Amino acid sequence: MPSNEMRDATKVKELRPLMSGVTLTVKVVSGPRSQVAECLVGDETGMIIFRAGNDQVDLMKEGSTVALRNAKIDMFNGSMRLVVENSGRVEVAEPASFTVMENNNLSLIEFELVNVFSQMADSKQAPSKPTFTKVMQLRPMTSGVTLTVKVVSTKIICPKGRAGGPRGQMRIADCLVGDETAMIIFTARNDQVDLMKEGSTVTLRNAKIDMFKGSMKLAVDKNGRIEVAEPANFTVMENNNLSLIEFERVDVVI
């Protein structure tokens, strides 16, 4: 029987900037090349660069399986690096049975550091061209992002509201959308449903993340818009559905 700690282990694809105190079991894809080195590690959900230091280097042998306890994410030039400091430890583990997903390297995703005060100062200036976000970069509470995605599937949800009422009948659909980095459920409402045709490419402008039972769903409210776009040439990564990740709400008492 696996221990509770192992059952609660984090998967690589669940790692996010500033995350800390996580435990992972990973395979070493490529080992270090110097005394303080970067190793490529991963599991069946993705890969990430692990920065090994001092005695950790000796444990990171290519092909071995290791448990990283109390690990955390450091940011380097806008990209994630996994590290284990003095409060954690690296342990050699029994060989894992999974195959590393080598086409989902989280360290290749670049995150943009947003300076809130600079944003406020620049708010009176003319708006600049939107920066396009990848699905894998979406996080709880994300808002104001623009994405280009393909519609993988559309499922009509039981309509809300009363037929013949003052506002008619509301239409809602859960649409699975994605790009080359991941997928997520997009909740389409009313006229948006007509645009979310399976196989089509759409641009979601001023989109945001809503949380539903601890999971992320993408939405565009009245402040944004959906545009049918030219067919994208990427292939959707269908084995990385962000809406299947459950987040736990933590109340911080100050």
Image: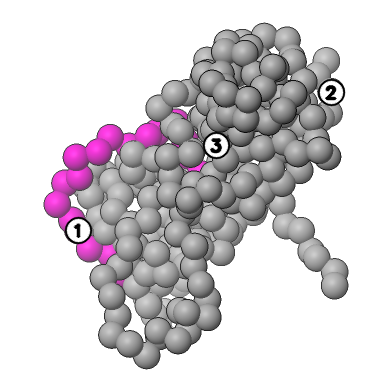
Point out the frontmost of discs 2 and 1: 2
Indicate whether 245 appears above or below 223. above
**Residue range of the region highlighted in magenta in the rendering:** 225-242
**Is residue 70 part of the magenta span, yes or no?**
no
Residue at the image point whose x is 38% and y is 50% from the top: 134
Secondary structure, mark 3, is helix
Check the image and report above or below for 76 versus 40.
below
- Residue 57, image x, y percentages: 67, 22
- The residue pinned by badge 3 equals 13
Q: Position of residue 162 (x, y in %)?
A: 45, 72
Q: Position of residue 165 (x, y in %)?
A: 41, 79
**CB under 8 Å between discs 2 and 1:** no
Mark toward the viewer: 2 or 3: 3
Whichever of callouts 2 and 1 sits on the residue coming sooner in the sequence is 2
Number of the label disc, if any, that sits on residue 80: none
How far apart are labels 2 and 1 at the CA level? 49 Å
Instruction: Tell me which amino acid carries mark 3.
Output: Lys
Residue 3 is tagged as: 2
- Residue 108 appears anywhere in the view: yes
Q: Mark 1 or mark 3, which is nearer the start of the sequence?
A: 3
The quarter holding residue 104 reads top left
Dots 3 and 1: beta carbons under 8 Å? no
Question: Hey, what amino acid is under mark 2?
Answer: Ser
Q: Residue at x 54, y 44 (%)?
A: 80
User: Which quarter of the image is occupied by the C terminus?
Assistant: bottom right
Q: Is residue 237 magenta?
A: yes
Question: For mark 1, what is the residue?
Answer: 228
Closer to the chain start, of discs 2 and 3, is: 2
Name the secondary structure under disc 1.
strand
